[in-house]
Amino acid sequence: MLPLSGTAAKLGLCQRQGGGFLVEIEPAMAHKLDLKRGGDVDFVAYVATYRSRAVAAKLSSMTGLHVSGLRPAAEWIDSISALTVQSLSCGDVQWIDLRGISGAGLESRWLGYPHGYVQYSRVTKEAAQVFDSAIDGGCCLPVR
């Protein structure tokens, strides 16, 4: 794993406030991105779909008391040949930000803290740029 140099990235608070003690990253809208929010009593989730002529890719997130965001799933790690790590500040919470590239040049990103995660896995560079724009342009939303 290679650390990235520089200070931790920081997301601002969303205009609308949820008023809770957990925080979620609310992705920003991006070109060619279909973003849907859902959830239940104990979690909130986003699914974002990117479509171009040749590619369809998904970004997903989940935040809640019973969500384990301490590490990416084994499927996320499979086939990653280069990995970098840094931190991202969302409100008062530090998230781990992992980025990886497969031997085939497909990109993956996973951000997590003990009660949530945001991820995409093995997508084209074009899809990764759109997803990164949605994540990095997003904001922190306190949730109940």
Image (cartoon, rainbow, N blue to C red):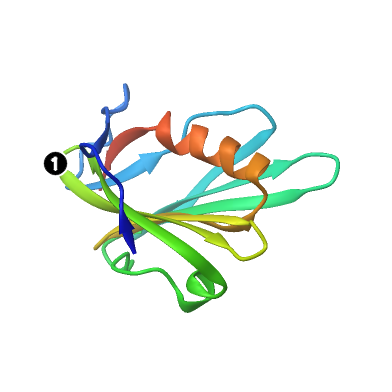
Closer-to-camera residue (17/128): 128
Crowd class of label 1 (few under 14; some 14 to 19; many from 20; radius 10 Å): few
At a point 37% along the width and 56% down the height, the residue shown is: 84
Name the residue furthest right. 53
Query: Is residue 141 left or right of 19 when viewed as pictured?
Result: right
At a point 30% along the width and 47% down the height, the residue shown is: 4
| Residue 93, position as x, y percentages in the image | 18, 46
Q: Is residue 41 visible?
A: no
| In this view, 142 is above or below 98 | above
Q: Is residue 66 visible?
A: yes
Name the residue furthest left. 92
Name the residue furthest top. 15
Query: Is residue 46 left or right of 112 when viewed as pictured?
Result: right
Query: Is residue 106 left or right of 42 when viewed as pictured?
Result: right
Q: Please state which amino acid type lies under the numbered disc 1.
A: Asp
Q: Which residue is mark 1?
A: 92
* Secondary structure beneath label 1: loop
| Residue 62, position as x, y percentages in the image | 41, 56
At a point 65% along the width and 38% down the height, the residue shown is: 34
